[in-house]
Image (cartoon, grey):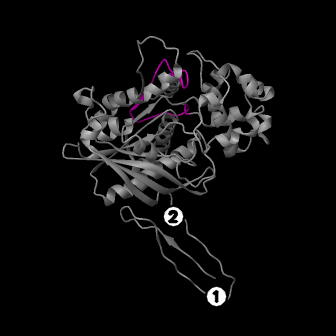
Amino acid sequence: MSLIIMGYSKNKLMLPVLRTLILTSVLSPTVVAAWPQRGTLIESKVLATYKRDTIAAFLPNDPPSEQPKCDVQVVKLTYATVGVRRENATATGVLLIPDGPDCPRPYPILTWGPSTSAQRHVGQDKTIVNANGNTPLVTRLASQGYVLVSPDYLGLGDSDYPFHPYLHLFTEVSSTIDAVRAARDVLWHSNTPLSNKVMLSGFSQGGQAALAVQREIEAHQSLSQEFSLVASAPISGPYALSQTILDSWSGRNKVGENTIIIPFASYLIIGMQRTYRNIYISPQQVFQEPWASKVEALFPGDTQISLSDFPKPDQIKTYFQPSFYNDFQNNPLNPFRRDLIRNDLLTWTPRTPTLLCGSSNDSVVPLKNATSAVASFSQRGSTQVSVLDVDSGKPKTNDGLAAHSASLESCAIAVRHQLLDKQR
C-alpha cells in the first residue's frame, strides 16, 4: 500500500508543498490524498500594484474626499472550499491590499460579492488588471484603506467545480468565508496591519451574497468569534429572490421592462437544476427550441453572452415552454419556485448595522427587494437595517438596466461615507 499525504505551505505567496510518505505492504497499491481543510490557501500570486497617483488619474473631477489615500496591490487567491453537497472543491478570488505613507491604518477587511458573470474562466483578477485598476473596487474602496477580499464564487474564475450554483446562498457564503480565511494567511505573512474588523458588501448577486454571509455569521457563535462583524452594506441585491422573478415573469414589473429577465431566469433555472436536481429531466421540458439544445452550455460558458443573444422580454412566452411558464406563475409548489424560496433572505433578524443601497429606477433588481427586507426585519424586531435610494428625487428613467449598473459605483461611495467609514 502507498499513502501520499499532501501538506500545504503557509509561506507567503508560495505554491503547495508536497510531502510524500510511502508505506509498503503486501496489499495492492493505494493512493490517498488528504484534502486541505476549508479556507486553506493553496496559491497566491501578486498580479499588479497601482500607485496612488495612477488611481487618482482615474478621478480627475472628484472632490478631495474621493481622492485615493493608498497604493493598491492585487493578489489572486486559490483556496480550498466546498461544493453544494459539501464535497471538496477549490475556488479563486482576489485580494486587494492597500499601502502607502498616508494610508489610514489599521485596515478593516471588507468582503465584496461580485455581480453576475456568465463567463466561466474570467475571474475578477483579470477584470481588474485588464482595466489597469480603473474599477470601483480599487478607486472607491481599496484605495481608501480597505482590504478587499472577493471570491469569484464556486465554478467561476479558475475554480475546479463543474458548474456555478447561481444565487445559491450556501455556496455564496462558503466561498466568501473561505476566501477571507485564505486571505488572512497572505495578510499575516505580509505583515499587513489589520484592525480585526470585518465588513460586508457586494453588488447585485454580490448584494445577496453579502446579506447571506451576514446571516450566517450572526447565526453561529463560532463564526461571530472568528469574524468581528461591524457593518454590512449590500448593494442592489435580490434578497426577495422568488418575488423578484415572479414580479418580472411577464417581462415587466412595476418599475418598467426587465430587459434581462430571460437570461436571468435561464441562469437561475440551470443553476438550481444542477444544485437541487428537481426542475427537469431534459431542458426541452423548460425551454423551447432552438434554446433547449444550447442554453445549458451558456450558463456559465466559455464566451461572454449579450442581451442580443436572447429574445426580447416581451417574447418570453415563446422562449419557455407554455406548461413550464404557466406552472411557475400559478403553482406555489412549482419546483423552480420552491428552489428560489429556499434562497430568499427575509426571515431572520439582523443584529449588525446594515445599509441596503439601491436605485428606485432599477427594473432589473428593483429596490422593492430592500424595502421588503427592511419591513420583514422590522417585524422580527430588528432596528439595525435601513435603506438608501441613490436615485431618490431623480426623474424616472426608461433604462432600468442602466440604473441597476450605475448603482454599483454610486452606492459604493454612499455606503462608504454613511456606514463603513463610521465603523472602521
Q: Quadrant of residue 415?
A: top left
Q: Is residue 244 left or right of residue 280?
A: left
The residue lying at 79 percent from left, 36 percent from top is 284
**Which quadrant does the N terminus fall into?**
bottom right
Relative image position of residue 200 (x, y in whole percent): 41, 39
Q: Quadrant of residue 272?
A: top right
**Which quadrant does the C terminus fall into?**
top left
Magenta-colored segment: predominant secondary structure: loop
Q: Amino acid at mark 1?
A: Ser
Relative to 238, does residue 367 appear above or below in the rendering?
Answer: above
Where disc 1 sits, the SS reads: loop
Disc 2: CA contacts within 10 A as few (<14), some (14-19) or many (>=20) = some
- Which residue carries the number 2 mark? 36
Residue 357 can be seen in this image: no
- Which residue carries the number 1 mark? 25
Q: Amino acid at mark 2?
A: Pro
Residue nearest the observer in this picture, 155 or 84: 155
Where disc 2 sits, the SS reads: loop
Say whether residue 49 is magenta. Answer: no
Relative to 117, does residue 237 appear above or below in the rendering?
Answer: above
User: Where are the magenta residues, as a range?
Assistant: 345-368
Q: Is residue 8 left or right of residue 283?
A: left
